[in-house]
Image: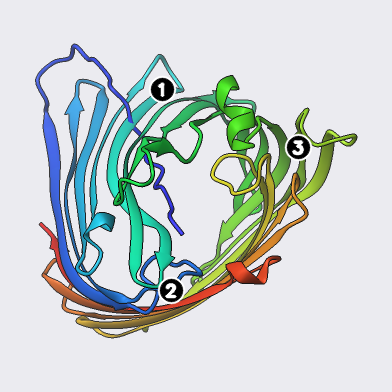
Amino acid sequence: MRSFPAVAASVVFLTTPAPAASETTFDYSAGYGHSSNIFEDPQVLSGPFWEGRLGLRGSLELGEGKLSYGIRQFERRITDFRFADTHLTGGTLGYAFPLGQGLLVELEAAAIRNDSGDLFLKLPNNVIGYRTVDYSSQAAAKVTAEGLGGKTAFSAKYDERRRGIAEFTTDLIQPTKLDPDVALATFGVSHFRAVAGGELCLCLEYSRSIIPGNEQNSFSRFPATTLRGSIAYARRFDDGVTLIGEIGMITLASDNLGDTNRYTEPYLRAEAKWETSAGFEIGSGFRQDIAIDDIDDAVAELTRTVSASVAQRFNPWMKASLGYEVSRATYYYYLYDRKAETLTAKLLLGPEKKPQLEIEYAHTLQRETDPTQDYSANTIVARIGGSF
């Protein structure tokens, strides 16, 4: 199954003095791998792939403000199914500056162009695929003010994904659009203050998904809103233990949910992590939320995710890690459920700030209400990468 990465983006025009200081980092990696189910699809096709990444990120001090930027390029070549090659280009730009005493303004924007392909139909003697060029953009603003015994942050974000026309590998299928355009507008306010050696947050967030009117019925994808209120607390202890907890309620509303157009669910988040001076790390997490943007349902999904990880650095040039995650999604529009399990093992060889070799194995298992949509995949990839 195909996933479209969401990337933030922005364009900010500035008139400022010459930069006083700057930081620049160049990231790179190249890898080769093999997957038993390269499209992560019930129509199983295996094969090798190549991948490469290049990125440039940095920051500039401009007067009292700070400009941050980043550009990246990702290439993936699937040797046996070239229609599924990926060419992804993205860029980000941000600017943070003080506005008076105790007031910080942060602006961010980004854009991404994703030229990629996917599997459409596997026939006994033929494989039909397609390619699309999709675009994603995001603009965000945040204002943080000191006062009321702590800090209060006001935020706004707009994320838009525009889907391209699918061009098929056979002339028997005319070019067509397979997915609707989706946008998400989010507004939030959070108040932070120090409490008992940690930080307490009172959080309120409103989100609205936006679907073009002429695409709602043709793609069976409808707008919805969520309103979430929660209280969160985080603390790091001297022995390397970090705890984060958040509890609240989230309400989903939509005119396309039948007689019951409103649902209220508990919002839960819990994270725990322990790091020792000997290089050992162990962590776990749980989250329950309602998603209305990147979903397979027509309106919204109730998601629950449980994760656990363990890592050990044996010496300055060797680190091993193991992670496990189970995610469940319950649809609101359709009577449908989806469960995905992922097991990941990694071995990292090489000192920090030098080229490193990473060997990664991932096992994915997905189960759905419709058993014909179940699949599993085993992927192993070796990468060489670093930063300078």
Mark 2 or mark 3, whichever is nearer to me: 2
Judged from the image, the secondary structure of the residue bearing numbered disc 2 is loop
Task: Kindly state the secondary structure of the residue where label 3 is placed.
Answer: strand
Between marks 1 and 2, how big is the CA–CA gap? Answer: 49 Å
- Residue 244 is situated, as x and y percent measured from the top left of the image, at 61, 58
* Number of other residues with Cα within 10 Å of mark 3, as a class: few under 14, some 14 to 19, many 20 or more: many
Q: Which residue is drawn at 58% across and 25% down?
A: 147
Q: Please give left or right for residue 130 compared with residue 195 in the image.
A: left
Query: Quarter-wise, where is residue 333 in the image?
Result: top right
Q: Where is mark 3, residue-wise? A: 252
Disc 2 target residue: 44
Residue at the far front in the pictured view: 172
Q: In this view, does 269 lie above or below 188?
A: below
Question: Disc 1 or 2, which lies upstream in sequence?
Answer: 2
- For label 1, the crowd category at 10 Å Cα-Cα, with few meaning under 14, some 14 to 19 and many 20 or more, is some
Q: Residue at coordinates 13% horizontally, 16% vertically from top-left?
A: 17
Name the residue type under label 1: Val
Residue 245 at x, y = what percent? 66, 57
Q: Which of 384 and 318 lies nearest the eye of the viewer?
A: 384
Q: Name the residue under label 1.
A: 105
What separation in Å lies between label 2 and label 3 (alpha carbons)? 36 Å
The image shows residue 13, relative to residue 182, as above or below, that is above
Asked whether the beta carbons under mark 2 and mark 3 sit within 8 Å of each other, the answer is no
Give the label, 3 or 1, closer to the camera. Answer: 3
